Amino acid sequence: MTSSYRMQYSKKGPARYISHLDLLRSFERAGRRAGLPLSFTQGFNPHPKISFAAPLGVGTAGEAEYADIELNADLPAAEVFRALSGVLPEGLRLIEIRSIPEQSPSLMAAVDCATYRAVAKLDRPLDRKELDSAISSFMARPEIWVEPKLKAKENKKRNIRPGIFALSAESENDIIILEAELKTGSNGNVRFEQVLEALVETGGLPLKSGFVLSRTGVFTKNGQEKKTLW
């Protein structure tokens, strides 16, 4: 008998620098330390049945991330929560765990969009008019072409404008805070870093430091309605 559980967790502090592969290993080690009966795939190189909603870039914090884990036992979700909570590495924190039905759609297939926050220092304060002008001009562009550099096979320009659903900015003294809602998932995924690079390049923002990035939520959509992944 196997049982599946959906976890909501945060990834902050030093854990924001954990790669996606090391994040999988961190949950596997935590499951072993907790004495949980992890379920493994079959074959020559079995691995634990743990899957994530959407990979998070190294250096970006996650405030409400999701992962599914399968166990070879039907345990109460509260028991799984208690067992895992005490053994996760610094910066990884469980928020909630729920049991999910067998054959539930995969998290990757369910994700449609995500919300992000970026914070940086400015060389000088910006007033409301300057901020609004920079954002409205950027969002009025019909096309925003970027050239991904992570993998050679992806090294071709792509128009990310259709995947930028919302963008806003606030500033206080020399601090700027940008919030965005972007297309996320296996089809048409837009990286927040790409949006910020394009905005800084064309918007003339007087940055003094690099951005500190957070993903604040991951969602599915039912029509225009945005929902969490529970």
Image (tube, helix red, strand yellow):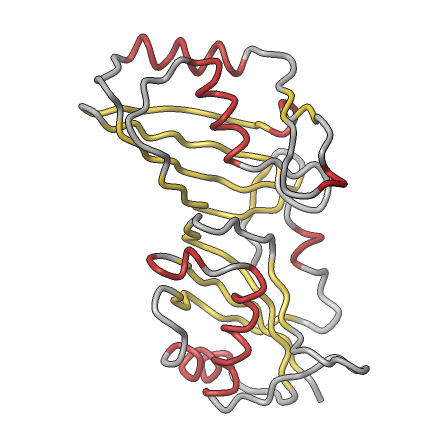
Residue for point 58% across, 11% down: 141
Please identify the quarter of the rendering in which residue 213 is found: top left
The N terminus lies in quadrant: bottom right
- In screen coordinates, is 72 left or right of 65? right
Task: Give the quarter of the image for residue 159.
Answer: top right
Q: Position of residue 206 (x, y in %)?
A: 32, 18
Is 89 left or right of 99, judged from the image as shown? left
Position of 72 relative to 69 (above/below): below
Q: How many numbered marks are there? A: 0
Residue at left 40%, top 81%? 82
Position of the C terminus, as image quadrant, is bottom right
Q: Position of residue 12 (x, y in %)?
A: 37, 57
Q: Residue furthest front?
A: 152
Q: Residue sitting at 43 percent across and 56 percent down? A: 17
Residue 156 spot, x, y in % from top left: 73, 30
Position of residue 115 relative to residue 2, above or below, is above
Q: Position of residue 225 (x, y in %)?
A: 59, 38
Residue at the far left: name it: 173
Please name the residue shown 71% across and 53% down the image. Answer: 109
- Left or right: 72 in relation to 98: right
